[in-house]
Amino acid sequence: MVDFFKMIAESYAQKENLVLATILEKSGSAPCSGGTKMLIRPDLTTFGTIGGGLIEAMVIQTAARVYRNHADHIESFDLKSKDKKSQGMICGGTLKIIFEYIDWWKNQNQSFYEEIFRLQEAKQDFITITRINHHLNNISLPEKWVCTETGFYGPESDASQNLVEEVCTNFEQYKYRAAFLEPSGFYVEPFFCNENVVIIGCGKIGGILAELSKLVGFYVTMVDDREEFANWSRFKKVDDVLVVPGLKNIENNVIINQYSFVVIVTRGHSDDKEVLAQMLETDAKYIGMIGSHNKCNYIYQSLLNQGFNINDWERVHCPIGINISADTPEEIAVSIVAEMIEIRRS
């Protein structure tokens, strides 16, 4: 997300207006998750991706209309083959996307993003809140707030007061959550600069790894689909423990961004491959997966068959950890944390 703000800052300096497309809601097997963004420039070139292929082409078409109308817009895309608008897409699911027309001649846009640029420069965590009217197309410029641990920036509003106070009061709990759309029409989106370790799989190695990761200063989140493994009685010192309904759509439950270190230590090859495919769609700084060379080669070939390429695979640390001839779970955990430290310090 830092790169997005860098691009927005460059357009601000040049006073080149932009369209920012953000997924508000996702259902079914639609590509990408809530909070995924794409910038569309006036010449309709893009930065970032919102799913690729036909959905991306449809988003660019809508952005062109936003440029013509000079107004924000919300649109839902039904990605089913029977829907004419979907142009034959078969992935299923729906996406609700907000298209924000960033007009630098409007003071509200200038002041909002100037505050974000300031917080980014100071490497200070923040959460944005956007008030959205679902019932209108060509919506007026949405109200926006920036919340930090010590306060908020934005217009005074009775409608948002309770939510802003809730977010500021419980900032530590909110800032590591995935972006979400409130029923009352507020979109809450966290942005944090701290490095977090997301350990997917709460077996023995995952437990030891959690303790070591906390010891060296990471924010640690444990994720598993088994409540008997993912619970606070087993992990008293970590920052968050999540029981997920399955190992699909993990990003719907925990935020993973360019500061995140992901360690995949699930209970089997198929689960590891399922999780790895999802993590390769994220901006994670580090993706490590436990396994032998044979397992890594098998999963690599499977991912190629799914449409991934060698550049994707080069992001994966597998076998995981620095080679110290580790054998026991404790030694393996040490090698993994050592590798994450090396990446963090490089």
Image (tube, rainbow, N blue to C red):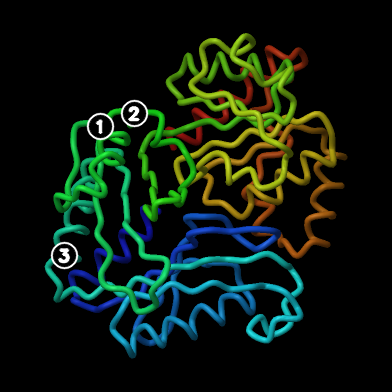
Picture coordinates of residue 182, whole percent (x, y): 43, 49
| Residue extending farthest left | 107
- Quarter of the figure with residue 68: bottom left
Q: Nearer the viewer, residue 229 or 289?
A: 229
List x then y, in percent, for residue 42. 34, 84
* Looking at the image, residue 148 lies above or below residue 227: below
Q: Residue at x 26, y 47 (%)?
A: 160
Using the rendered view, name the quadrant where residue 208 is placed.
top right
Q: What amino acid does circle 2 point to?
A: Asn
- Amino acid of disc 1: Glu
Quick one: label 3 or label 1, which is nearer the N terminus?
Answer: 3
User: Disc 1 to disc 2, how far (Cα)?
Assistant: 8 Å
- The x and y percentages for residue 76 are 54, 72
* Disc marking residue 149: 1
Count of marks, rendered view: 3
Give the spatial CA distance, label 2 vs label 3: 27 Å
Residue at the spot of label 2: 170
Look at label 3 and name its amino acid.
Gln
Say which residue label 3 marks.
Answer: 108
- The image position of residue 218, as x and y in percent, is 46, 25
